[in-house]
Image: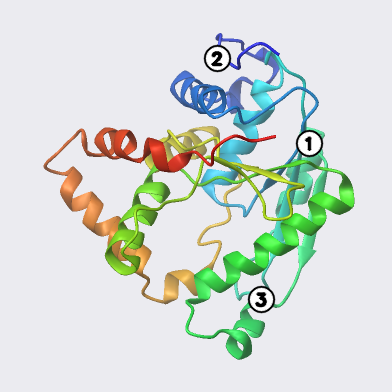
Amino acid sequence: PQPFRYTGGMDSSTTSLKPPKSLLRQVGRAIADFDMIRDGDRILLGVSGGKDSLSLLLILRHLQTYAPVRFELAALTIDPQVPGFDPTPLQEWYRGLGLSWYYESQPIMDQAKTHMDGDSFCAYCARMKRGIMYRLCRDHGYNVLALAQHLDDLAESLLMSMFHGGQLRTMKAHYLNDAGDVRIIRPLAYCRERQTRDYSERAGLPVIADNCPACFSMPTRRAHMKALLAQEEAGNAHLFSSLLQAMRPLLREGPLP
């Protein structure tokens, strides 16, 4: 198929939700650089209800209108049954978009209290959610799982791995799961968190505030890295461009099927 490039296509029927050109270009470039989306792909996007996943949902939905490859898109929300998290208002919004939505509820927070072993709640929750997402991909015939981590997340993961694990590692932009049946992609790999925040506010997206109250109530290493990076960026406007350049070799898994 032709390489995936942003060409400026616009859908006048969804002007209020139209992603900005900067986001579309960056996502399109990441998709092309890492061969994320291929003709005939069936993509299931993990949507927490936060600004990043809702923004990515509309970006991918917009790209469907003019991409040189044809792909299907659906959304998945996992309810970890933490206090204050209620994703049900999204159902009507998805219906208005004409989008398929899968929902699964599991008491992950309660399970963590008895099953965590030297792990953080966030890491345990992420691992449990990933297993659920793989299962739903298989059950419903989706070969690609899209996740909404952005450049800030990747940079924070890099520092955490270096500082606490002694390794040069971060989340990959595109890779195959261990079972070899689901490809995982991160189309926001080149995008900054402030871009999705600005877009979600301008478009009035139905963001679920503090979509994981447990994470906000517990100090985390990631929060410390976020603060550290913000402090450094205040004196170096090109910090994240430099970090992206340094991380590029780490974002690739190698040859994919």
Which label was assigned to residue 96? 1
* Residue 233 in the image, given as x and y percentages of width and height: 19, 43
Q: Is residue 42 above or below residue 117?
A: above
Quick one: 30 or 16, which is closer to the camera? 30
Mark-to-mark CA distance, 1 and 2? 26 Å
Single out the residue that lies furthest toward the left. Answer: 235
Q: Is residue 93 left or right of residue 232?
A: right
**Among numbered discs 1 and 2, the one appearing first in the sequence:** 2
Badge 2: residue crowd in 10 Å (few <14, some 14–19, many ≥20):
some
Residue 225 visible in the snapshot: yes
* Residue 232 in the image, given as x and y percentages of width and height: 17, 48
In this view, the mark in front (1 or 3)? 3
Kind of residue at badge 3: Ile
Q: Is residue 211 left or right of residue 43?
A: left
Mark-to-mark CA distance, 1 and 3? 29 Å
**Residue beneath the point at 52% across and 44% down:** 52
Residue 205 visible in the snapshot: no
Kind of residue at badge 2: Tyr
Q: Which colouring convention does the figure follow?
A: rainbow
Quick one: 190 or 106, which is closer to the camera? 190
Badge 1: residue crowd in 10 Å (few <14, some 14–19, many ≥20):
few
Q: Which residue is mark 2?
A: 6
Kind of residue at badge 1: Gly
Which label was assigned to residue 247? none
The quarter in which the C terminus is drawn is top right
Q: Is residue 228 left or right of residue 193?
A: left
Q: Which residue is mark 3?
A: 108
Single out the residue that lies furthest toward the bottom. Answer: 114
* Residue 191 in the image, given as x and y percentages of width and height: 43, 34
